[in-house]
Amino acid sequence: APVGIMLAERNPLSIETLMLTSPPTYEDITTPIPQSELETNYNFLRSPLLGGLAFAVLESRTLIQFFSNLFLFQNDCDEEWLDETQNESCLEARTPVQAFNAGLLQHRSFERELKEMTQSLVVVSGEGDKRVAGREAYRSEIGERCTLRTIMGGCNVLPWETPTNVVDLIKELGY
């Protein structure tokens, strides 16, 4: 979401509408994580010993399945998802995962960009997403430029879980 928000705010002539699927809550995207917390998180994940142990657990198929079922999917994740996560788990993939999990995308607030961008904003949630209520603030803070939509049959990884529904919504909105 932060990358999309920055691109839209900086390119108003090229980007007419920004669609965010399952973005962080408005509070999360507008409340920066303190620098000291980011450093602690990142240093832990980058630590050869502790970070290595953490990733040995985090990259296990069992934990990926548990986490995915608990937070990402409305129903249980499928075998293809698990196979892909296992195929993509490697040392080279750890650095962006470490940065993401440390909270580096939340190093600052994106409230200014959200409020100053002139484009329409469509915030899409899956019907099973537990963070829907936290996204209501996009509409209340941004106003009429923001539309909240719900896709049936999904939770937090909508393009994977319900690709047809995501494409249908894009078509419905005329893109």
Image (cartoon, rainbow, N blue to C red):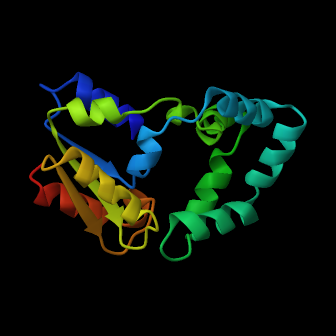
Quarter of the rendering occupied by the N terminus: top left
* Residue 161 in the image, given as x and y percentages of width and height: 42, 66
Please tell me which residue is depicted at 20% across the width and 63% down the height of the picture: 168
Q: Is residue 164 above or below residue 137?
A: below
- Give left or right: position of 127 versus 33: left
Q: Nearer the viewer, residue 5 or 83?
A: 5
* Residue 150 in the image, given as x and y percentages of width and height: 28, 67
Please tell me which residue is depicted at 68% across the width and 34% down the height of the picture: 37
* Residue 50 in the image, given as x and y percentages of width and height: 87, 39
Q: Nearer the viewer, residue 28 or 174?
A: 28
Q: Is residue 11 above or below residue 15?
A: above
Q: Is residue 85 above or below residue 93?
A: below
Residue reaching furthest right? 49
Using the rendered view, name the quadrant where residue 15 is placed: top left
- Give left or right: position of 56 versus 175: right
Q: Nearer the viewer, residue 118 or 155?
A: 118
Residue reaching furthest left? 174
**In the rendered picture of this protein, how many numbered marks are placed on residues?**
0
* Residue 51 in the image, given as x and y percentages of width and height: 82, 38
Using the rendered view, name the quadrant where residue 82 is placed: bottom right
- Give left or right: position of 22 versus 102: left
Please tell me which residue is depicted at 14% across the width and 33% down the height of the picture: 118
Q: Is residue 92 visible?
A: no
Q: Is residue 124 visible?
A: yes
Please tell me which residue is depicted at 29% across the width and 50% down the height of the picture: 138
